[in-house]
Image: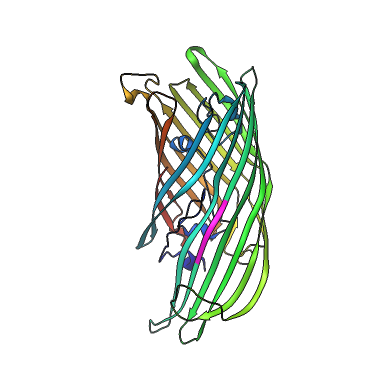
Amino acid sequence: MIKKILTLLTFTLSIAGFAQRSNSSPYSFFGIGDPAALKSVEEIGMGKTGGVLDSPYQLSFTNPASYASLLYTTYVFSGGNRATKFVDNDITETSSHAGFTYLALGIPIRGNQGLAVGLQLNTSVGYSLLDTNYDDEDVLVETNKFTGTGGTNRFYMGYAYKFPFHLNIGVEAAYIFGGIDNSIHNRRLNVQYATIHRIDSYVKGYEFRAGAFYTYPLKDNVEIKAGASFTFGHELNDKGDESLYTVENNNDAIQQPIEYLYTRTYNATLTYPLKSVISIGAGKVNKWFVGADYTFMDAIDSNGTLLDDQDVYKYVKSNMFSVGGSFTPKFNSISNYLYRITYRTGFYMNKSGLMINDTQVEDYGISFGVSLPVSLNISNLNLGVELGNRGTNEGNLLKEKYLILD
């Protein structure tokens, strides 16, 4: 079954609403969709590294303790585009999608405290897959079209405090919400009616995080940092309507139900365990920075979801290692604009918590980024680029090669 699901024959492009990036990956079929990075463009440019990254005028999202370093009111907004090549042995397809990723506001308080509020993409669902069956005479006798759209968003508020002895501590609370629509359209040769199995669900729940990092100052404005952040265990409820009904056996885009075979309330839960991020870094203020993050989490517990009763996939332990850095030649240069640009690069290796056909889905890539100053003030235009691979052709899976512009 999973081989047919992941055999990519056709993709559709959909642009979701505000703070909701569209998706076009068969891996978004599972659970509540593809998880978003939950990183700022600056962090993405450094290989998704940011656990001890702080700035007086830029927001980072990995560790809420960073909010206490803000000295200026900061507005950030990001959108992106993802182009993907799907490889299944001799079959290659391409797709692209674009949309918003986050909108946030950071407010400094009394020089040693910070408040942040924002809206982020949390997960995204977007796929259109066609499974075909032929008889011995190579006649098409059955098709199953799998489609899914939607995803979840994350509205959060965070607060952080900086102590005089170079210790930052922060907390964050988030409300996760969104809608997901999945359907399977089954058509058979010489059968009057087709059937559609549809699930329209709404996901909601709360999430809490806490983090801290310590800065050890050295000579010449050089600093060494170490920290950690934790997303505490929480539960998301996925509730909606499930139905199976017949429609005319044709290619019409709009299918009106003829007869409902059954309807029921759909209710599932996803229980997330503690997620930890351990971080180290070093840098010189307004000059350079290098850091590394290690993220790990036990398996997600799924109960009552669409595929719980089938041996298709399961959740396992996940971990990600990332390392990256930045360099600014001369942040206050007046004569040379290129000297005031901040240049970033990094790489990451991610073992996701999704296992299909006893094969864990892995993701790895490199990234680059720049912060382009706007005139002589502290405003910046931040750009990031990711080049990576996800999945494999082993174990009847699908390999994705992607380019992401943020």
Q: Is residue 273 visible?
A: no
Residue 69 sits in quarter: top right
x, y (%) of residue 191? Answer: 49, 86
- Return the residue found at the far top: 219
Q: Which residue is more in the foreground, 149 or 222?
A: 149
Along the horizontal axis of the image, is 369 left or right of 280? left
Q: Is residue 385 magenta?
A: no
Q: Is residue 150 magenta?
A: yes
Which segment is the magenta one?
A: 147-152
In the rendered view, tell whether residue 15 sits above or below residue 161: below
Residue 66 sits in quarter: top right
In the rendered view, tell whether residue 53 sits above or below residue 102: above
Q: Which residue is more in the foreground, 55 or 216?
A: 55
x, y (%) of residue 327? Answer: 40, 26
x, y (%) of residue 30? Answer: 55, 59
The C terminus lies in quadrant? top left
**Most common SS among magenta residues:** strand
Q: Residue at x 50, y 12 (%)?
A: 219
Q: Which residue is more in the foreground, 291 or 59?
A: 59
Q: Is residue 348 visible?
A: yes
x, y (%) of residue 346? Answer: 43, 35
For the image, the number of numbered tags is: 0
Residue 91 sits in quarter: bottom left
Along the horizontal axis of the image, is 81 left or right of 110? left
Q: Residue at x 49, y 36 (%)?
A: 76
Q: Which residue is more in the foreground, 364 or 405?
A: 405
Q: Residue at x 58, y 21 (%)?
A: 215
